[in-house]
Amino acid sequence: MRKLFAIFALLGAMGWCAPLMAQDKPAAPAAAPAAAAPAAAAPAAAPAAAAPSATPTPAPTPNKGDVAWMLTSTALVLMMSVPALALFYGGLVRSKNMLSVLMQVFVTFSLITVIWCIYGYSLAFTEGSGTLGQFFGGWDRLFLKGTFDSTKGEFSMAATFSKGTPLYELVYVAFQATFAAITCCLILGAVVERIKFSAVLIFMVLWFTFSYAPVAHMVWFWMGPDAYTAANQVDPMNAKAGLLWQWGALDFAGGTVVHINSGVAGLVGAYLVGKRVGYGKEVMAPHNVTMTMIGAALLWVGWFGFNAGSALEANGSAALAFMNTYLATACAVLSWMFGEWLFKGKPSMVGAASGAVAGLVAITPAAGNVGIPGAFVIGLSAGLVCLWGVNGLKKLLGADDALDVFGVHAVGGILGALLTGVFNSPTLGGPSFPVDWFTGKITPAADYSILGQLWIQAKAVGVVFVWTGVVAFISFKIADLLVGLRVTEEEEREGLDINSHGETAYRM
């Protein structure tokens, strides 16, 4: 235990210096910059300039409906991890490892939430310095400083995607905290039933710091619509955004940040931790499909907060994201089920539940970025493509990705990210995207290049794929050097519940 505490002290020190990349800057004023992007926060609008001899216009205040919706969405995303993901994953493992999965998800979610509030939010969603600011934020919100002034009773504001429509920054902090935490939890599915609990915790601190936070910054950080006060401010404001945002990559709620990021890390972990004892020779069937179905159903419900909440307002964009999430998931359930029925002879409950998750994953980057036609195509494609991902592709890769994190999340995320570039086009029913944030003008159908946007999406996928793969490899290797990655063969055969936690999920 002392050794583990010493290790976390070391990791904490590494976290403090994480960026050489992010130089310290003074804390932002209460009503000023917190950043934003597709699913990101932005600076609240400055007070409008007063007309001569007129009373200054007061700064806009948050709409109570938007605040209520975002608080609800945050709670829904929290439910996606505990209990939804924990039950979904737990039901898929053998009974001797059920409690270990619940523990890993529950504690990882808690750990990342704490780290997020210490420095993660600041690294992801504040302005960085110079060229490295395209990859990392700064320390403006260390320990969430500046978000609430207790002496004045004032809260800092973050912007939404509409000018003059702020949101309490603390609401945005909490919303994005749930994204960070569930992303880390997703990785666990690839390495369950044989990884040490201490190795999980060490890996999570490292990977979160050097992969999740920078990828979120690259994809989602920008200065917010209120920063675009004049035509000559468009380029300077764009230059302060994250690298992939500057490229024009579209990711409404986390296809790259959440799913490709975690899916690739999971695959790396599966290779480095190694195959489970008896893999391919012994039966490793799910011990409780009922729990898996309950978990999948709760994920579907919670995902409305994940996707529709990423509109940051209770508006038409949220409605579109909600409906697309609903529809694409149902389509994926059917396409996976019928595909499995055709190729394996019988439709399974595990297959239907996996299809639901595949649809949810694939529609995530597209939720508010495509129209209804896009939702149909993405959902139907996701079920079949991810069915191949957990069968044909898995055999080609040869890794024991126990719960198919790569086959569903990485493959589904890549599919969704690429098809977003296609179905964002107005000619295919999509909402397109702004020409610039000063005028708010939307790119017309005649000017929209599907091939051009598809290329941008592909480059973003490639950057995230390589970034998270390298960071995951190094993080797992460090954990291996410090405590070792996996339990002994004897402990693995007996089960992680009793050996790692001294208790069992069931007493018969």
Image (cartoon, rainbow, N blue to C red):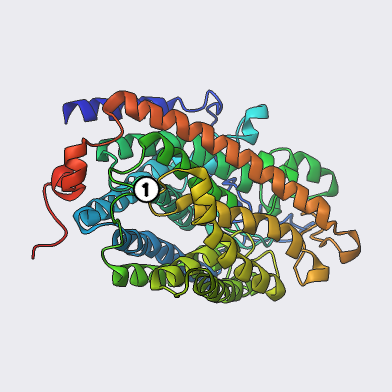
Q: Is residue 248 above or below residue 72?
A: above
Quadrant (top left/top right/bottom left/bottom right) for the N terminus: top left
Whether residue 27 is visible, yes or no, is no
Quarter of the image holding residue 55? bottom right
Q: Residue at (35%, 49%) from the top-left corner? A: 280
Query: Does residue 247 appear to the left or right of 286 in the view shown?
Result: right
Q: Secondary structure at mark 1?
A: helix
Residue found at the far right of this picture = 446
> Percent x, y for residue 309?
53, 65
Q: Locate residue 306, reporting x and y percent.
A: 50, 63
Please give the name of the residue rendered at 65% of the width and 35% of the height, measured from the top-left corner: 134
Q: Considering only vertical position in the picture, is 164 above or below 333?
A: above
Q: List x then y, in percent, for residue 180.
A: 45, 49
Which residue is at 44% across, 37% downward? Answer: 207
Rendered-image quadrant of the C terminus: bottom left
Q: Is residue 171 left or right of residue 431?
A: left
31, 254: nearer the viewer: 254
Can residue 48 be seen at all in this image of the molecule? Answer: yes
Amino acid type at mark 1: Leu
Residue appearing at x 77%, y 48% in the figure = 455
Q: How many marks?
A: 1
Residue 405 placed where, x, y %? 45, 52
In this view, the residue in front, 93 or 480, is 93
Q: Which residue is mark 1?
A: 188
Q: Residues within 10 Å of mark 1 (few under 14, many from 20)?
A: many
Left or right of residue 442: residue 225: left
